[in-house]
């Protein structure tokens, strides 16, 4: 099978674009390079390791083609480094394990995915489309505010996000050790400022290593939960058009000294994090009698949810929304671990956390989450939950 890029007929024809290929399978890497070298105006850099790819970022490539599953990390680690260097570089991911990584990929117009095996013609067309985009137009942010925050949390980075939007909104979020330490915008500071900025549409984001240390944080809680709460509030109220006011000088953060310059060694492969679709709590949840039969001395509450954590129905005593959100996040970690160990699809699992026992069953169209107290035989309880929802152990 043959494919070619041909010569580019654009106003930038005399500019040599740099393409970085990161693929550890040498045969496939050579094949990709052959396709690209048919265009004499492309400078090709290639490597099979994440460590070398991070070094080659100093050459400021115009396009990156990367595998997701690498011997010394993940292509997502490369994505994090691009974000924190402020490089707006399109990335084409190629992978044979799309289902394993899909939940972790930010929803960005700068990212394309080709699932192995793929036709060289498709690869060549995608390269042409990416390189032929009008280079004279001003670059937009590679990721949304929420994507930058998630990447900072995964990599445990110290970063400062400077945020601006077309509607005149301006603000700043400081992340220390992967957790939000400070947020402010034109309307104020703290948690409410974080919520206004986290999902700001069409925002221009400048992400830099933080040279400030916040001594008194004005935002409390885990970054993941803060994003969940911000998304929920956005679903409930929609965007509001608030008047613009200036921030008083006294409201600036208490900063001292200089922090880490942010240029850490490549991080370990991240935990899966995905943009959660939140429950629309404007519609009251009604207890579902169909789940009553699953409530027992071992199970105090049970809920049925979509795979993104949105609660469909519940029965018994439980915080259905929080329980399903926690369970679905944990389920992605369980599925990733099972994939790494070669165990196949995870149909059900249980876990004991403190004084609670959790039971999660994957059905074809939904996830069933049950919560109970300490249990000396959780496997038996999980089997009963499986039987109760129509899935036999």
Image (cartoon, rainbow, N blue to C red):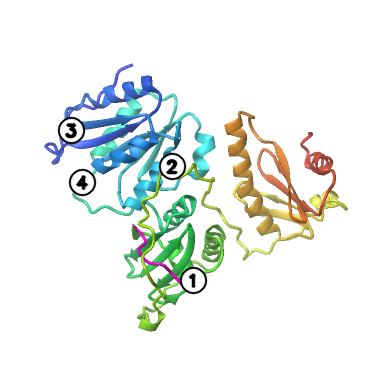
- Closer to the observer: label 1 or label 2? 1
Q: Which percent across, then down, holds residue 324?
A: 67, 53
Q: How far separated are the C-alphas under marks 4 and 1?
A: 40 Å
Q: Which mark is residue 242?
A: none
Let me know if residue 141 appears in the view: yes
Q: Which residues are magenta?
A: 208-215
The residue lying at 41 percent from left, 77 percent from top is 187
Mark 1 or mark 2: name the one nearer the start of the chain.
2
Let me know if residue 239 appears in the view: no
Q: Nearer the viewer, residue 333 or 202?
A: 333
The quadrant in which the C terminus is found is top right
- Residue 77 is left or right of residue 220, and the answer is left
Mark 2 or mark 3: name the one nearer the start of the chain.
3
Which residue of the protein is positioned furthest toward the top in this rendering?
A: 1
What is the crowding at mark 2: few (fewer than 14 residues within 10 Å), some, or many (at least 20)? many
* Residue 214 forms part of the magenta stretch: yes
The quadrant in which the N terminus is found is top left
What is the crowding at mark 3: few (fewer than 14 residues within 10 Å), some, or many (at least 20)? some
Q: Which mark is residue 76?
A: 2
What is the chief secondary structure element of the magenta stretch?
A: loop
Q: Secondary structure at mark 3?
A: loop
What is the crowding at mark 4: few (fewer than 14 residues within 10 Å), some, or many (at least 20)? few
Say above or below: 243 vs 161.
below
The residue lying at 46 percent from left, 50 percent from top is 155
- Residue 17 is left or right of residue 327, and the answer is left
Residue at numbered disc 1? 217
Mark 2 touches mark 3? (CB < 8 Å): no
Q: Which percent across, then down, holds residue 109?
A: 37, 46
Q: How far separated are the C-alphas under marks 2 and 4?
A: 25 Å
């Amino acid at each position: 099978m043959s494919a070619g890029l041909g010569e580019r007929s654009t106003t930038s024809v005399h500019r040599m674009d740099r393409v970085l290929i990161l693929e550890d399978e040498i045969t496939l890497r050579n094949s990709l390079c052959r396709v690209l070298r048919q265009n004499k105006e492309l400078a090709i850099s290639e490597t099979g390791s994440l460590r070398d790819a991070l070094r080659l970022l100093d050459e400021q490539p115009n396009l990156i083609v990367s595998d997701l599953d690498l011997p010394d990390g993940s292509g997502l680690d490369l994505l994090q480094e691009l974000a924190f260097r402020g490089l707006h570089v399109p990335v084409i991911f190629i992978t044979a394990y799309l289902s394993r990584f899909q939940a972790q990929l930010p929803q960005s117009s700068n990212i394309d995915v080709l699932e192995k095996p793929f036709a060289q013609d498709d690869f060549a067309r995608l390269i042409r489309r990416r390189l032929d985009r009008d280079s004279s137009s001003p670059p937009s942010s590679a990721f949304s505010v929420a994507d930058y925050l998630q990447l900072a949390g995964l990599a445990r980075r110290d970063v400062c996000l400077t945020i601006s939007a077309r509607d005149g909104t301006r603000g700043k979020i400081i992340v220390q050790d992967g957790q939000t330490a400070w947020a402010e915008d034109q309307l104020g500071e703290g948690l409410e400022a974080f919520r206004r900025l986290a999902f700001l549409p069409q925002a221009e984001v400048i992400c830099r290593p933080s040279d400030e240390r916040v001594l008194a944080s004005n935002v409390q809680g885990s970054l993941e939960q803060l994003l969940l709460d911000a998304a929920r509030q956005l679903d409930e109220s929609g965007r509001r058009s608030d008047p613009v006011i200036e921030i008083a000088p006294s409201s600036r953060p208490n900063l001292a000294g200089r922090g880490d310059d942010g240029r850490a060694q490549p991080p370990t492969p991240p935990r899966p994090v995905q943009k959660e679709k939140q429950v629309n709590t404007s519609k009251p949840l009604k207890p579902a009698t169909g789940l009553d039969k699953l409530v027992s001395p071992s199970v105090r509450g049970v809920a049925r949810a979509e795979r993104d954590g949105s609660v469909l129905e519940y029965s018994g005593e439980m915080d259905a929304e929080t329980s399903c959100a926690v369970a679905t996040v944990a389920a992605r970690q369980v599925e990733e671990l099972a994939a790494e160990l070669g165990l196949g699809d995870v149909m059900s699992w249980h876990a004991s956390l403190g004084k609670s026992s959790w039971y999660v069953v994957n059905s074809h169209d939904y996830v069933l989450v049950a919560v109970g107290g300490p249990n000396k035989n959780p496997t038996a309880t999980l089997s009963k939950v499986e039987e109760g929802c129509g899935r036999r152990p």
